[in-house]
Amino acid sequence: MGLLSFSNAFGGTPESKFWNWFTKNQDMIFNFEKDTETVFDKLSFQMNKVNPELTFEFGPIKTSGKREFVISAGGIKSAFSSVESLFGAAPESEKWIFVKYRQRRSPLNDLEYGGISIAANDVHYQLYKDGDKLGIIIFLDGYDESQHNLYGHLGFLFLDEALGEYDIETKVGFIEFHNRESEQYDGALPLSELAGAFDEYYSQ
C-alpha cells in the first residue's frame, strides 16, 4: 500500500486549504463592508495558518465587477516566499484579481494614522547611493523624533504607495525620516516624482 504524503493526508497544503476556505466564503469576503471586523478577523486567522507575517488589502470593486485581493508580506522580506507560494496557488476566479505585494499607487493618497494626517503633496524625498542600492530620506511635515513610531509608520506607507512593497524591500538601502527643518531638506523633491527617478536610476 502506498503512503500518502503528510500534506495530502491532512487535506492539502496550507496554501490550498486557504484557497478552499476563501472560495467557500468568497461572497462574504467580497462584500466585507457589511461586517468588516468579523470578515477581517476570519481572513487573518486563515492567512496566519500559511504564515503569521502575511497580511492583505482589498481594492474597490471595478467596473468589470471584479475586486483586487492583495497578498502582502507586510514589508517583511523573509515572508516573500510565502507571498509567492500563496499567490502561485491562487485559483482562477470570475470575481477576484489576485495581486502579490502592495503595488505602487498613482496618484498617491493622503494618509492618516494614530491621529496624524499628512497630505501626499507635503511629502518630499532625497535619494542617495547606498552600495548597490538607493538610500532614501523622506521628509514629513511635523516629524518629531519623540513620535518616531507613528511618523515612521506613515513614512513606510507613503513609500509603499510610491514604489511598491517589492522594490522597497529589494532595491532600497537605508531609509530615514526627517522634518523640513532638516539640513538635508535643501533640494528635496515631491514624493510624486520618486518612482520616475528611482526607475531611471535602475534602468541605467
Image (cartoon, rainbow, N blue to C red):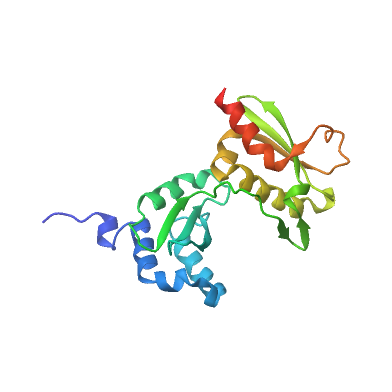
Judged from this view, the residue extending furthest toward the top is: 204
Where 196 sits versus 38, above or below? above
Q: Position of residue 6 (x, y in %)?
A: 28, 56
Q: Residue at x 18, y 55 (%)?
A: 3
Where 163 sits versus 66, above or below? above
Left or right: where 42 falls relative to 88? right
Q: Residue at x 89, y 41 (%)?
A: 181
Left or right: where 203 falls relative to 116? left
Q: Residue at x 81, y 53 (%)?
A: 147
Q: Nearer the viewer, residue 126 or 105?
A: 105
Q: Residue at x 58, y 34 (%)?
A: 171
Where 22 sits versus 87, above or below? below
The quadrant the N terminus occupies is: bottom left
Q: Classify residue 189 by image quadrant.
A: top right
Q: Position of residue 69 (x, y in %)?
A: 47, 58
Q: Nearer the viewer, residue 119 or 145?
A: 119
Q: Position of residue 37 (x, y in %)?
A: 57, 73
Judged from this view, the residue extending furthest toward the bottom is: 34
Left or right: where 198 falls relative to 78? right
Judged from this view, the residue extending furthest toward the front is: 63
Q: Nearer the viewer, residue 195 or 183?
A: 195
The quadrant the C terminus occupies is: top right
